[in-house]
Amino acid sequence: MSPRFLPTLVRRQRASLKATLLAPPLALAVAIVLNLGLYMLMGRDPVAVVHAMLLEPFLSWSSFSEVLLKTGPLLLIAQGLAIGFRAKVFNIGAEGQFILGAIFASAIPVWFPQATGGWIWPSMLLLGALGGALWASITAFWRVRLNANEILVSLMLSLVAAQLLYYLLLGPWKDPAGFNFPQSVMFQYDAIVPTLFPGTRVNVSLLIALALSLAAWVFMQKSFMGYKLQVGGLAPRAAGYAGFSEGRAIWLSLLIGGFAAGLAGAAEVAGPLGQLQRSISTGYGYAAIIVAYLGGLHPIGIIVSSLVMAAIYIGGDNAMVSANLPIAAVRVFQGSLLLAYLVAVAFVRYRLEWPHAAARSTP
């Protein structure tokens, strides 16, 4: 077909608030339909998959408590990433910053296994957050000083972080009584984050995530620095003309993202795991990218989207057992959800214009 007969995307003067709010649930519905079709082609029972993946996480308190447990790290990382994304600073290395946060936090119980006191787990969370920020600062340095692409640098650093984790667990930090498994010693009682509800693994990190969500909203909506970040993302030339420093925005965005991801990593080893393991790298840093965009890069929306993504995690585990669904299918569901959302947002912000319609509107 000749290009002159193809429609073009024309930016709308103003995006509809109703359409913006409808985009995430519509994307979720489209992703569900597409993946159910895929599961049928794979020979799986779609009813069993829907029940296991979408319903079971909410049918019992034990299952829902696990959803809340996974909501914490997703919410923390996504809130940090969203601040950078709104400033057009694309930190894709939250997985590596998450790992470094876990490593830094684990240093205290590994080096001081006999230490006691209520200062240990808060110190671990703080040290983990600083570790994540330090790892993100490498990306910021390369981006500001050497004009390297932050997407590639942060992504490659995640691979370096994983190798550093493997080195520690197979070498100096390996538990000598761990039957040769690549893991650290089990942490002492005072190195474990307190739980919120008896009989569950939900811990204080969920409250910290909610508190930082509120702080993210205040920072982006009420502070002058947040305003400068948003202007830099929406209109870089206007930000430069107004004297807003691009380098400062890059440093701040990446440090916030690294701080949040490192805090999530620290909460993971000081919470449900209770030790440093190779399995600490579970893809939270990548899934949080989907969470951030599915929430519209807004702190309130991210709270909802993190809960949805956590339910998909738990539902996917259920579906692997009860519906014989491979783990790759769960990841495809996550990816298709992001793709569906991006398509929906594109039509919220743009409209299709056909050549004959444009010709009629031309005087």
Image (cartoon, rainbow, N blue to C red):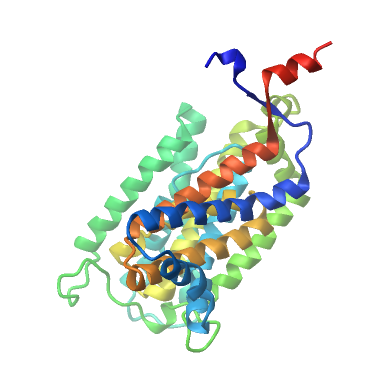
- The spot of residue 219 in percent (x, y) is 71, 52
Q: Is residue 214 left or right of residue 264?
A: right
- The spot of residue 243 in percent (x, y) is 73, 28
Which quarter of the image is occupied by the C terminus? top right
Q: Is residue 53 left or right of residue 240?
A: left
- The spot of residue 79 in percent (x, y) is 59, 55
Q: Residue furthest bottom?
A: 198
Q: Residue furthest left?
A: 180
Question: Residue 201: in sight, yes or no?
Answer: yes
- The vertical placement of 283 against 160, above or below, is below
Q: Is residue 120 left or right of residue 12?
A: left
Residue at 35%, 73% (x, y): give it. Answer: 322
- The vertical placement of 226 against 47, above or below, is above
Residue at 49%, 56% (x, y): give it. Answer: 261
- The vertical placement of 31 against 67, above or below, is above
Q: Residue furthest right?
A: 363
